[in-house]
Image (cartoon, rainbow, N blue to C red):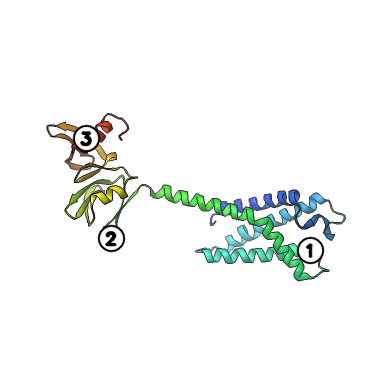
Amino acid sequence: MDSKKSRWTLVSAIGIYAILFMHLYVPFNVQKWPQNAGMSEYIYLSGFGVVAWIYLVISQIIIKEHLRFQQFTNRHFIIWTIVELLLFSFLMMLLFGDLQLNLLHEYWLAIKLSILVGMIPYSGVILYFKLLEKNKTTISTNHLVKITDSNNDLKLVVDNSQLLLLKSADNYVEIYYLKDGQVKKELVRTTLKILEQELSNQPIKRCQRSYMVNINRVAVIQKNSQGYNIELNGYDQPIPVSKNYKQYFVDLLSNQDPQ
């Protein structure tokens, strides 16, 4: 909810929802409140939504923009929302309540009305942006390959477009990747079997008992007397393909969907 666009969406949603809600459901018999005397019911009921819209423009757009929080945390958000609710309810009581009656009762009625009307659009908009943010985060990070060791500690994060291959080395795995155009190697204590499972959603596929390669960097798949070899863009050593994985790379070579 930091961006002005998000806050305008929140303000507009609550204003529109409040007007529709008041006309469709007429909660608390507000059409019979004393202040309604002599006033068009349409204008009176719409007034709740208009007042809510103006109030939130001041609170969410003007005041928040002026204060310019460096970091608006969840705790700040909760406090802001509670204060916003209490002040808005007080304003509603002054404008629409019967000040001749018990003020605490009128104030409590205004709070209930504010919660009833605002809860659904407020929660709905926040949930929408939360899901949108989560989706963006997933989209923005699914190109990253995360390598963990046998203790499940994160050892390396590399863009999958820069990852070349993984090579088994006894109880370790050698990770080859490009950085600034140069081939780099990282040694991680784990196994290819574990990494094959962890990276199943990445384009890093097993081609031999000791190798996994980035299929997006395959430049050449060449048949020889022993079977096939793979050459990768950015890596100058051929990589063997075993019989168990031959069909996958044959399908890849022939532009079929590898199984």
Viewer-proximal residue, 254 or 46?
254
Residue furthest out toward the left: 225
Residue to which mark 2 is pinned: 151
Q: Amino acid at mark 2?
A: Asn
Q: Is residue 236 above or below residue 122?
A: above
Residue at the spot x=14%, y=32% of the render?
Answer: 224
Report the quarter where the N terminus lies. bottom right
| Picture coordinates of residue 209, whole percent (x, y) | 19, 44
Dot 1 or dot 3: first in sequence order is 1
Residue at the spot x=71%, y=48% of the render?
Answer: 20
Residue at the spot x=59%, y=55% of the render?
Answer: 123
Q: Residues within 10 Å of mark 1 (few under 14, many from 20)?
A: many
Report if residue 4 is visible in the image. Answer: no
Residue to which mark 3 is pinned: 246
Q: Is residue 33 above or below residue 16?
A: below
Viewer-proximal residue, 67 or 31?
31
Viewer-side label of 2, 1: 2
Q: Amino acid at mark 3?
A: Lys
Q: Is residue 179 above or below residue 225?
A: below
Q: Amino acid at mark 1?
A: Gly
SS category of the residue bearing label 1: loop
Residue at the spot x=72%, y=66% of the render?
Answer: 108
Q: CA distance from mark 1 to mark 3?
A: 79 Å
Q: Which label was assigned to residue 97?
A: 1
Q: Quadrant of residue 120?
A: bottom right
